[in-house]
Amino acid sequence: MAEEVLAELVSVVYQVVVTEGDEVQEGDTLVILESMKMEIPVLAESGGTVTAVGVKEGDAIKAGHVIAVIS
C-alpha cells in the first residue's frame, strides 16, 4: 500500500534528498523544508521504495501538499 508523505506547514523546499526509485528506511530524510529561516527535515514514516516525488527545490508549498509517495 502506498503512503503519501504530506507537508505539515507552509514552507519552501530547500533540498530534495531522494529521487524516484530510491529505497528508504523509516526515519530517512526525504526533503528539507525551510520555514521562518529554519530548516525542517521531512522523514519517511515507513520503509519502502520512493515511487513519486511531488516537489522540487525552490517550490513554495502549503500544508497538505504531497511531498513524496512511498510504496
Image (cartoon, rainbow, N blue to C red):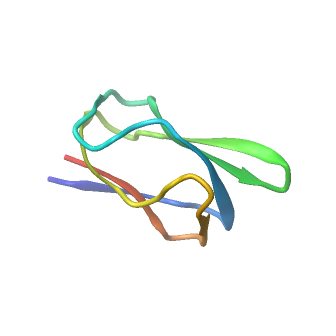
Which quarter of the picture shows residue 13?
bottom right
**Rendered residue at 20%/54% (across/down):** 2
Task: Please indicate whether residue 5 sits to the left or right of residue 48 in the image.
Answer: right
Q: Residue furthest left?
A: 1
**Rendered residue at 59%/63% (across/down):** 59
Where residue 71 appears, x then y in whole percent?
A: 19, 46
Compared to residue 7, the image places residue 15 above or below, namely: above
**Rendered residue at 50%/55% (across/down):** 56
Nearest to the observer: residue 59 or residue 35 = 59
Where residue 60 appears, x then y in whole percent?
A: 63, 67
Compared to residue 7, the image places residue 64 above or below, namely: below
Which quarter of the picture shows residue 15?
top right
Task: Please indicate whether residue 3 sits to the left or right of residue 40 in the image.
Answer: left
Where residue 40 appears, x then y in whole percent?
A: 68, 43
**Rendered residue at 57%/52% (across/down):** 57
Where residue 28 appears, x then y in whole percent?
A: 44, 29
Counting labels gives 0
